[in-house]
Amino acid sequence: MTPEQAYRKAKKSEKRIPKLEPTISKDAYYSYCYAIEVIEGRFILAEQTISKNAFYSYLYAKDVIEGRWEKGEETISKDARYSFWYATDVIEGKLPDFMHNQMILENNEYTIEYIEYIK
C-alpha cells in the first residue's frame, strides 16, 4: 500500500487508523493532509519526514502547529520564499538568527520584502 492509498483510506473512514500511519508518514504531502484532515492536529510520527520538505514544513508550522516549529526551520531556511512566508505568516516577526542571516545572504526579492517587513 502506498502513502496515498493509506491516506485516502483513512480520510474515507473519517478517523485515525494507527496501523496505516507508518505508511502515511513516509510522504510529506500525505502526512500534512492526514494531520489537517484526519487527525486535526500534530502527526508526531511524520514530523521527521515533513521537516525535510520546506513547503510542507512551512504549512505544517502555519496550519498544524500554529506557531514556530523549530524542527522544520533548517529546511525552511534553505528557501527564501518559504522563509519569508514563515516570518510573515507563522512567526509574525523577525526570523530566528540563523534563518535571518540565511535570508539576508540570499539577496533576492524575498530578502527585500523581508527587510521591509521587519523594519
Image (cartoon, rainbow, N blue to C red):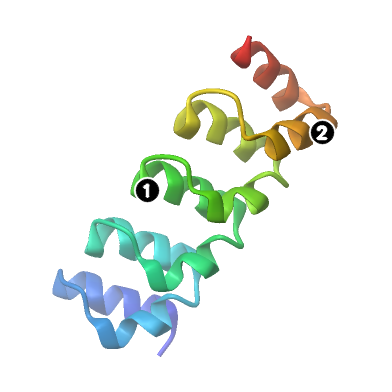
Tell which of 93 and 23 is nearer to you: 93
Q: In which quarter of the image is residue 80?
A: top right
**Quarter of the figure that contains the C terminus:** top right
Amino acid type, label 1: Ile
- Whichever of callouts 1 and 2 sits on the residue coming sooner in the sequence is 1
Horizontal side of residue 40 vs 54, given as left or right: left
Tell which of 60 and 37 is nearer to you: 60
Residue 30 position, x and y percent, is 41, 67
- In three-dimensional space, the C-alpha distance between marks 1 and 2, rounded to whole angstroms, equals 27 Å
Residue 74's place in the image compared with 29, above or below, is above
Amino acid type, label 2: Glu
Residue named by callout 2: 106
Horizontal side of residue 12 vs 24, given as left or right: left
Tell which of 8 and 56 is nearer to you: 56
Q: Which residue is drawn at 27% across and 57% down?
A: 41
Q: Which mark is residue 88?
A: none
Secondary structure under the numbered disc 1 in the rendered image = helix
Q: Residues within 10 Å of mark 1 (few under 14, many from 20)?
A: some
Q: How crowded is mark 2: few (under 14 residues within 10 Å), some or many (20 or more)?
A: some
Residue named by callout 1: 65
Nearer the camera: disc 1 or disc 2? 1
Secondary structure under the numbered disc 2 in the rendered image = helix
Residue 114 position, x and y percent, is 66, 21
